[in-house]
Amino acid sequence: MSVLKVKKILLEVAVIFLGGIALYFATSHNAFMYQQPILQVTAVENGKTSVTKDEFSNRDEQTTQRLTGRILNGSSKGEKYTFSNTYTKSGGIDQKFHVGQQLFVNLYHQKGRTSVSVSTYKRDTYFAILVWIMLCLLLLVMKIKGLRALGSVLFNFILFILIVQLDVNWNITSFFAIFACSALIFTALTLVWILGWNKQCLITLEAIVIGTALAFAICIFAMWITNDQGMHYEALDFATQQPKQLFLAASVIGLLGTVMDAATDIVSTLFEMKRRQPQVGFKRLYSSGKQVGKSIMGPLVNVLLLIFFAETFTLAILYFRTGNSIGYTFSWTMSLGLVQSLISGIGITLVIPTASFLAAITLGRTEK
């Protein structure tokens, strides 16, 4: 390894390290940017721990803390307050606080006295450091392509927030079409951003649209023929609009994501194969595409199941610990997520031959 390359690596490491320190310092001292009062804990006194037990024989430990802290922003900046916080060992709906932590609090003034209640923990420092680490890894591993991928994520996130805000402000009744079309737009923009507007992008987009449409059509047909039996749409968290439409919108977004992953891998592999072996024909391309699909199908389906388990694990444990049966717990915590995973699995299965055929027929020619 040359001396110049070693110096370059050392410089990159130094920039990453110093940048992380600067970011940590900036986010730790940015209380002036928030309107809600922020309190920094300066002293903690833990009381005695008591054992609690409910009617389902669930045991827990409960402790009351006496916290002292100083307000960092707003009209009460610099003032000190003492208040209590009760936390449990399980930490299900509460949290133990330590000296140095910053908390969002609410201040209540009554009859010359001020009481303090904790709203939530200030987590922007941890979030900023994680984002910084992700950016550095993308730059080190993928260079400019990593930044382009991140840019597409940010762009789609902003568009998604705008669509949600549009739905909230206009209070649209039939909003499924809006979210479905926006998800398709997100997909197209992402492909153009990453791949550029070329033949590979067009074929990938066609495969995604066809695979998604077929899988979703099968889903709608199955739900229609079974009359939505066993589908507890009301179990959706914070469903303030029509729950079935919310479920379908979420299903389409998840389906597009998984289908896009599979189609991109297959089409990219076949294009690279064609560049390396210009003489390859339709049959070999189509067969290779299916082989690629078979190799990624297992991991993708397992990823879907792991995401499903991660989303429902905590709530399912709560249901089990409060005396509910397996059937009842599954119906109200797992059924909708499992259906969405099945829809995405069907989409992966259908997009494998679709993407392989479209890429092969576009790139292939008669083998000699």
Image (cartoon, rainbow, N blue to C red):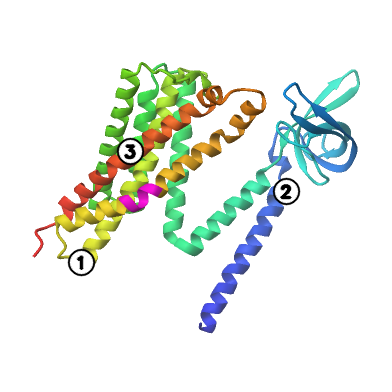
Q: Which mark is residue 28?
A: 2
First-in-chain label (1 vs 3): 1
Residue at image mark 1: 277
The segment highlighted magenta reads 294-298
SS at badge 2: helix
Q: Is residue 278 left or right of residue 349?
A: left
Q: Residue at x 51, y 78 (%)?
A: 5
Evaluate whether residue 349 shows in this view. Answer: yes
Going by the image, does 280 lie left or right of 75? left
Q: Nearer the viewer, residue 194 or 332?
A: 332
User: Mark 1 to mark 2: distance in Å?
Assistant: 55 Å
Q: Name the residue tied to disc 3.
A: 347
- In percent of width and height, residue 21 lies at 68, 59
Residue 198 percent coordinates (x, y): 25, 52
Q: Are marks 1 and 3 in contact (CB under 8 Å)?
A: no
The residue located at (31%, 47%) in the rendering is 263
Report the predominant secondary structure element of the magenta stretch. Answer: helix
In the image, taking residue 292 as reference, residue 318 lies left or right, namely: right
Q: Residues within 10 Å of mark 2 (few under 14, many from 20)?
A: some
Q: Nearer the viewer, residue 88 or 122?
A: 88
Instruction: Based on the picture, tell me whether residue 297 belongs to the magenta stretch.
Output: yes
* Image vertical order of residue 205 relative to residue 59, above or below: below
Image quarter of residue 17: bottom right
Q: Which numbered marker is on residue 341?
A: none
Under mark 3, the amino acid is Gly
Q: Is residue 176 magenta?
A: no
Dots 1, 2 in contact, CB < 8 A: no
